[in-house]
Amino acid sequence: MNRLRAWWVVALVALSAGLPLASTAATPFQLDDLQKLVKLSDPQISPDGKSVAIVTSTPVWKTDKHDTEIDVVDVASGATRALTHDREDVSSPRWSPDGTQLAFLAKDAKTKQPQIHVMPLAGGDAQRITDTKEGVVEFTWSPDGSRIAYVTQDPPVNEQAIKAHNKVFQVTDGNFLLRKAVAPWHLWVVAATGGTPTRLTEGDWSLQTDQEGATPLVWSRDGKSIVFTKFPSPYWGPSFRSVIAEVAADGKGKPETLVGDQGANDFAHAADGKAFAFLRVRNGDQNNGNAVYVGGASATHDATAALARNFNAYAWLPGGKALLLQGDLGTRSVLWEQPLHAAARVLDLGDVEAGSELGVAKTGEVAFIGSTMTHPGELYVMASANARPRQLTHFNAFVDKLDLGRTTSVQWKSGDGLDADGVLTYPVDYRKGKTYPLVLVIHGGPEAASTVRFSPLPQLLAAQGFLVFQPNYRGSTNLGDAYQHAIFRDTGEGPGKDVMAGLAAVEKLGIVDPDKVAVSGWSYGGYMTTWLTGHYDTWKAAVSGAALTDWVMDYTIAYYQMGDLYFFGGSPWTAEYWDIWRQQSPITHARNVKAPTLIMGDVGDSNVPLVNSYEWYHALRDNGVTVEFWAYPADTHFPGDIVQQTDVYRRWVGWMTKYLK
């Protein structure tokens, strides 16, 4: 949920060069184009900086699956060669320290689980080196390349009882969809050539939770120990109390806490010196953004305190005297260079939006997946933090031939004076002087942000003649901690006013047909949709996807639990906090809804259980509102397969066309 005063300020800087001109091209972005989009992920730059390994995922309509493979891209020429063929669920390419081998995960035919495979780059077949019953979820090479540390899940908690047909389990921090207790994930080490592995950790605590993967494993420079994130249990609920621990790599010691600050994760040593870094929400307040803390030779401190904003990822730059940071700055996704003892600077990426997966070579080259307003993700490299990015791949080149709606930024002030912003996409056939129906597409999270990078849904709507507005309401991560923190104890009303102020700012441009405005969103965007339709009569239609409609129910049956507590300060089942949870729940205001509403969601969604949508559906139907409810038989928060993804977008766009055209 991956969560008004009468004047507004609209920044027209992005429009100063003139409004979008009429298009002459004939082919906009369409549903069929979803099948052609190749997703790139996990860029891993080689130790010498000369090659980058990436994972590519291509949807296959006929089988409704994705073909995944690992490609190695030459930094100098951009030449690409595939390393893996006819392997399922390939992921996690990792270079050996000397760059002569590449390890990766792939589903094994025998165990039907992801196992570690090691491939020599000089030629030869990949060799499987693990045979774990539950599969490998994370791994890393030792500094000398002789061993690999990995994380795998323990057998079922009550394995013997299950074999005897007694499958009862105790409910603790799990969600209501679980059918068994979740076993913890623990750390093992094995020779890089395979063999008998050595177990390094055990206990009720875990290196991973049931909702998020393990954070990176980090070897000490001498190869004698391994650092990892230690979660209180395998359930996501108490994961905010994670610490960073270290254990001997020979299996002869017990883990010791290295960083005891709760919420610490994503540890990394500097390449040189004794410094280390880790992520943690600033000052331990879960309503703030992620900060990067640095420790080692001196006391641990927030190296990003002067920026006071959220960072999605970081990496050490060579020399150990500066960090590379990634996050959203307004409606741009940017990189910063953060020296340890000086002010940070935003890197010049031109029109490229930087993704959060970063690779930095020992020689200083930087690799990341980037996109632009008009082009989906591709691999980019920078010769150093001072260089401009250079595009290496062209997997999605077909998009360059399409006619896309122009995307720009809009700024305004919320009713209580906070600076806010959003993204506006124009219809493909825009003509100056005309007004157009407007669709709000509200991002989820709420700890997320809409930026100007290429996005399929806004382009699908723009192709049908709609203006598309994506507002960043309080709680969003792109405008600093003050804006993000403002959602505390104000999850609906405040964000709702932010959105309405943004809508008024867009309407002041004179391009919106005020009688044809609709609202939509998925996850927390769905929550905002249900809140807004229950509080304002502006809307001619609504699409509510995977919407949280009842905070009390969400806390009670979803996997969040303590995650929801941070929004309000205490439990909905105590007298002190009883009212606020219910007042901020859209279901309380469902009788006010008038807009024809399309509801969608996944049946097995443990993130925002579909029970929320069932409540909303019956509340609207029983009050005479036009409503349709479609459920996808998937155990995810949003359908992961191309056929059902396409169906979601088809219904979304079709609903808007039906009621706004």
Image: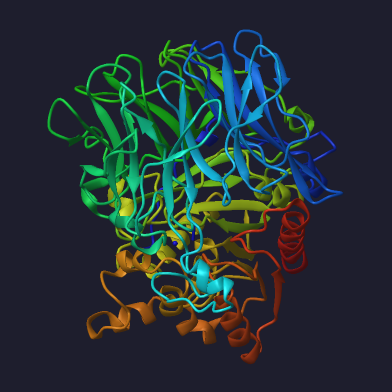
- Is residue 418 something one can see in this rendering? no
**Residue 639 x %, y %:** 67, 58
Instruction: Locate residue 474: give its quadrant.
Output: bottom left
**Residue 564 x %, y %:** 37, 67
* Residue at x 48% of width, y 25% of height: 359
* Residue 278 versus residue 170 in the image, above or below: above
* Residue 624 versus residue 338 in the image, above or below: below
* Left or right of 442 on screen, residue 223: left
* Residue at x 55% of width, y 66% of height: 526
* Left or right of 155 on screen, residue 636: right
* Residue at x 31% of width, y 27% of height: 224
**Residue 72 x %, y %:** 65, 20
* Residue at x 52% of width, y 17% of height: 46
- Between 640 and 122, the one lying in front of the other is 122
**Residue 447 x %, y %:** 42, 53
* Extreme residue in the left direction: 299
- Is residue 367 something one can see in this rendering? yes
- Between 91 and 150, the one lying in front of the other is 150
